[in-house]
Image: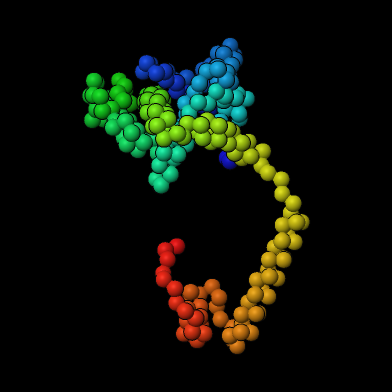
Amino acid sequence: RAGGGDVTGLALAAPDGTAAWLDTAELTPEDDRALAAWLADEAVGKAVHDAKGPLLATWSRGWDLRGLASDTQLAAYLLRPDQRVYDLADLVARNLRRELAVAGSGAEAGDQAAFVFDDDSAATDSMIRARAVVELAAALEAELDRQGGTRLLREGELPLTRTLATMEREGIAVDADYLDRLHTEFDASVAAAESDAFAVLGRPVNLGSPKQLQAVLFDELAMPKTRRTQT
């Protein structure tokens, strides 16, 4: 649901390539406390892909996610805001020239063009993605440094992620009566503008129809035509 979620498993990876998978259902109370403390530790930098979802999920479990040093989705957006999608697999292929793969899926052990583990399972898939995020975060951070965008990511986008997640979890307060008054005022303004236009034209037309407006403005009223622009 919006503003919620849960953590059923957690994949972690380190810069040296080691990775681990945790099934939260198997955590002891001591394990749970230790993991919660690590996740909330501001001094431990963490890289995540699309952090808002994991942030909401950790909150739902009573944990917190702090020390966020990179969100690879946001970093990729800052570098190439014209892209339509920022899927992790696509970003890994584009920036690392590698693919998210497991042994038996066309990648062999030692294949430097893939992230390879020994078996194909949900846990393995998550660890592959975790390793990819670590390497991708480093590559994107280097590119952001070259373009002068690191400060925007760390001081602007990452803190905003937490704000947006809080808004999604808590909701926002609105003045319904004030919005109703605005609605009435806008409707009245639109009706008045339509009435004035119909008075000038001498008849009603569909102001929402580009074809009818073109005929009225350029053919009947002989207004000067302007160069077409893309919208």
The residue under the point 31% across, 30% down is 96
User: Quick check: can you spot residue 12?
Assistant: yes
Q: Which quadrant of the figure has residue 85?
A: top left
Front-lying residue, 171 or 25: 171
What sort of colour scheme is used for the picture?
rainbow
Q: Residue at x 68, y 70 (%)?
A: 189
- Relative side of 36 to 132, left or right: right
Whether 78 is drawn above or below 189: the answer is above
Of 103 and 192, which appears nearest the observer?
A: 192
Q: Is residue 54 visible?
A: no
Where residue 97 sits: x, y (%)? 28, 32
Say whether residue 84 is left or right of residue 57: left
In x, y percent, where is residue 216?
51, 82
**Most distant residue in the right direction:** 177
Tell me: 187 left or right of 138. right
Picture residue at 68% right of the left edge, 44% below the top: 172
- Based on the displayed image, in which of its 4 quarters is residue 159 positioned? top right
| Quadrant of the image containing the N terminus | top right
Q: Position of residue 196 (x, y in %)?
A: 65, 80
Q: Camera-side residue: 200 or 11?
A: 200
Residue 92 in percent (x, y) is at: 34, 33
How many numbered discs, if any? 0
